[in-house]
């Protein structure tokens, strides 16, 4: 007959095992991990605060743009280690020396391009895909071109996973635009150019506009609106000083 071991010794061993398991569990969900990934409702609250304190307060008035900034989950577009900062007032690294733009700049550029439901928009510099996801909610079709193939691929996968199905992403040199898909109602250039790329102006429809940071040095970039009128005449105006990663020419 097998003896049931119910000695004080056995009970102590079993208690020790329970405590050890609890300690392992606690260290696996340390406070630090919890801080890195806040609960989803927390992200929603952070987006509301972002829109009030960074976007409306700085004068973005287009209600469609404001609503879109409340809806698009920016934390899905930043690397996991930056998720807790996803709704802060600045750009964040996305790898390979590139950045996701500051939320206010994304909202401002989206407002300036004057998106309308039937529009086809070109974005130069897909990066994380965040700006593309924002503008995609306000127009019919977005074409986004990215010079770093890894970013083009991961942004395309991310957009697909999030159910954004009106953005076509391609790896290539956006300095030359995307002639096969031209002309565009709007063009957003999300990297800093040293001059206005002539091929992009050509690919703008009459009545269309391009939003682009231009400056000979990164510290001297200005966000510009290039407006092409119905007759094809082009006018340029300056909006605000900005700082973007450089637009490569090749
Ligand atoms: N719009 C992005 C931020 C872009 S950062 C977002 O929402 O996350 C600028 C991006 O422009 C970088 O990914 C960079 O690789 C890309 N880029 C730079 N020069 C380019 C060019 N000539 N054509 C296409 N993409 C370019």
Image (tube, rainbow, N blue to C red):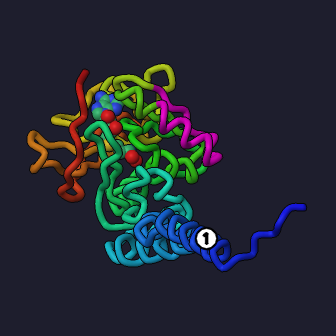
Q: Residue at x 38, y 70 (%)?
A: 55
| Residue at (83% x, 66% y) in the render | 3
Residue 101 appears left or right of 18: left
Residue 160 part of the magenta segment: yes
Considering depth in this image, is 150 or 227 the residue closer to the camera? 150
Name, please, the residue furthest toward the right. Answer: 1
Q: What residue would you read off at disc 1?
A: 13
Picture quadrant where residue 96 is located: top left
Task: Check disc 1 and report its element: helix, strand or loop.
Answer: helix
Q: Tell me if mark 1 has few (under 14), some (14-19) or many (20+) residues whose alpha carbon lies within 10 angstroms of its own.
A: few
Looking at the figure, which quarter contains the C terminus?
top left
Judging depth in this view, the residue of 201 and 94 nearest the camera is 94
Q: Write the residue at 25% across / 40% down.
A: 97
Name above or below for residue 231 compared with residue 36: above
Give, as a single range, the part of the protein colored magenta: 153-170
In the rendered view, does 43 fall on the left or right side of 98? right
Q: In which quarter of the image is residue 201?
A: top left
**Residue 101 picture location, percent across and down:** 33, 52
**Which of the image's four quarters has the N terminus?**
bottom right
Above/below status of 187 relative to 248: below
Residue 226 visible to the viewer:
no
- Ligand 1 falls in quadrant: top left
* Rendering quarter of residue 248: top left
The location of residue 247, given as percent across then percent down, is 24, 34
Is residue 163 within the magenta segment?
Answer: yes
**What residue is at 48 percent from the left and 31 percent from the top?**
153
Q: Is residue 153 visible?
A: yes
């Amino acid at each position: 007959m097998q003896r049931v071991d119910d000695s004080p010794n056995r009970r102590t061993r079993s208690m020790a095992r329970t405590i050890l398991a609890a300690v392992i569990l606690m260290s696996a969900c340390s406070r630090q991990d919890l801080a890195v990934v806040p609960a989803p409702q927390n992200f929603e609250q952070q987006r509301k605060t972002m829109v009030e304190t960074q976007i409306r307060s700085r004068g973005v008035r287009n209600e469609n743009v404001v609503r879109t900034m409340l809806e698009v989950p920016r934390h899905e577009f930043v690397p996991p280690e930056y998720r807790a900062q996803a709704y802060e007032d600045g750009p964040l690294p996305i790898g390979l020396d590139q950045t996701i733009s500051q939320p206010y700049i994304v909202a401002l550029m989206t407002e300036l391009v004057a998106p309308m439901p039937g529009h086809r928009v070109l974005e130069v510099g897909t990066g994380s895909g965040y700006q593309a996801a924002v503008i995609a909610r306000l127009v019919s079709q977005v074409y986004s071109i990215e010079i770093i193939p890894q970013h083009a691929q991961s942004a395309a996968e991310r957009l697909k996973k999030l159910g954004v199905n009106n953005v076509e992403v391609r790896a290539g040199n956006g300095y030359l635009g995307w002639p096969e898909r031209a002309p565009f109602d709007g063009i957003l250039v999300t990297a800093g150019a040293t001059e206005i790329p002539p091929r992009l102006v050509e690919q703008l429809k009459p009545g269309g506009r391009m939003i682009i940071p231009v400056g000979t040095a990164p510290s001297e970039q200005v966000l510009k609106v290039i407006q092409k009128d119905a007759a094809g005449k082009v006018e340029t105006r300056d909006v605000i000083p900005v700082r973007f990663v450089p637009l490569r020419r090749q």
